[in-house]
Image (cartoon, rainbow, N blue to C red):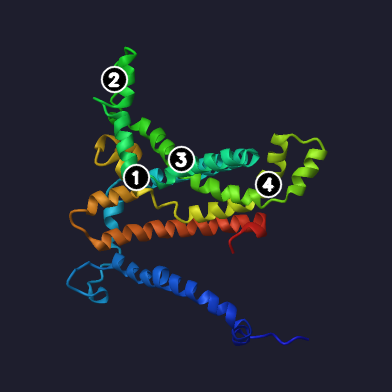
Amino acid sequence: MLKKRGILHELYTNKILFLMLLPTLIYFLINNYLPMIGIYYAFVQFDFNTSLFKMDFVGLKNFEFLWKSGKLVELTFNTIGYNIVFIFLGNVLSIFVAILLNDIRGKWFKKISQSILFLPYFVSFVILSVIVFNLFNYEQGVLNTVLQQLGSDPVDVYSKPKLWIFFIILFYLWKNFGYSMVIYLASITGISEDYYEAAKIDGANAFQRAWHITVPMLKNTFVILLLFALGSIMKGQFDLFYQMIGNNGLLFSTTDIIDTYVYRSLRVTFDMGMATAAGVYQSLFGFTLIMIVNAIIRKVNKDYALF
C-alpha cells in the first residue's frame, strides 16, 4: 500500500511549478483578498479621521438606506434582468457570429471582419454617450432629423422609459459581444477538423455540422463564461447606464440599477459605510447564485462545473 504524500513533499517535488505560480498567488492576495478587510466598513460609522477598526460599530444600519428607499426590489429586478439578457443574448450572438466567421474561407476578409466586430469594445462609454445623444437628441438628433425629412413629427425619446430597455440592450451588445465572440472563435479553431471531415463524408451540410459538432463542443466554454458572469450579476454596467441615462429621472423606472442609485444617493455625503453595504449586498447575492448554479451544473455534468 502506497503511503500518502503530504503537502511538504508536494512542495519539494514540484518546487519549480510552485515558484512559477507564486507571482499569481501574490497578485490575488494583494488585489483580491487583502481588500476584503474593507467589508468591515459596511458595519461601522465611517469617519475620515479614524482608522477602520476604531470606528463606531453600527451593525446593519448602513444597509437601511437600501431597504428603506422602497426601491430595493425594483433596483434588484432591473439589475438582474438586464444582466440576464446581456449574458444570454450576448453569448448566443457571439456563438452565432463566431460560427459564421469560422466558415469564411477568405483569410483577409475573415481577419478584417473580426477586427471590425471587435473594434467597438475599445470605444469608451463617454464616446458611446455622445453617439447616443447625437442619435436621439430631440432638436438635432439623427432620428428626429430623418423623421422630419419624411414628414413625421419628432419623437422625444428621452421621455419614453420603455424604449430605453431596447436601446441599452442594443448598445451593450454592439459594444461588448465582439469580446466574447473572439473567445468562442478561439475555441472553435481548437476543434479537430476530423469531426467536420467525417460529417462531410456522411453528407452533413454546414448548418448540421455547426449544430451537431460546433455548438456541443462550445458547451464547456459557454458554461465557464456563464458561471463567471453570474458571479457579478448584481454588478450593473455602471458606465453604460450612467453615461446613457445620466440624471434623467423620467427614465429611472426602467433603467435605474443598484450602482447608479447608490452613486446618486451618496455622491454628496460620500458615506463609505453605505457604499460598502451596497457592495456587500451585491457580492453576497452573486456568491449565493453562483454556488447554486454551480451545484446544479455539477449534478448534471461534473466536468462542466467550476469546482
CA separation in Å, label 3 and label 1 = 13 Å
What residue is at 29 percent from the left and 46 percent from the top? 70
| Disc 1 secondary structure class | helix
**Label 1 or label 4, whichever comes before in sequence order:** 1
CA separation in Å, label 1 and label 2 = 26 Å
Can residue 290 be seen by looking at this rendering?
yes
Amino acid carrying mark 4 in the image:
Pro
| Quadrant (top left/top right/bottom left/bottom right) for the C terminus | bottom right
Q: Residues within 10 Å of mark 4 (few under 14, many from 20)?
A: few
**Label 3 or label 1, whichever comes before in sequence order:** 1
In which image quadrant can residue 174 be found?
A: top left
Q: Residue reaching furthest right?
A: 202
Q: Which mark is residue 173?
A: 3
| Quadrant (top left/top right/bottom left/bottom right) for the N terminus | bottom right
Reading the image, the residue beneath label 1 is 125
What residue is at 51 percent from the left and 56 percent from the top? 228
19, 307: nearer the viewer: 19
Asked if 199 appears above or below 61 in the picture, the reply is above
Amino acid carrying mark 1 in the image:
Phe
Asked if 134 appears above or below 236 in the picture, the reply is above
Q: Residues within 10 Å of mark 2 (few under 14, many from 20)?
A: some
Amino acid carrying mark 2 in the image:
Pro
Can residue 82 be seen by looking at this rendering?
no
Amino acid carrying mark 3 in the image:
Leu
**Label 4 or label 2, whichever comes before in sequence order:** 2
Reading the image, the residue beneath label 4 is 216
Left or right for 83, reference 249: right
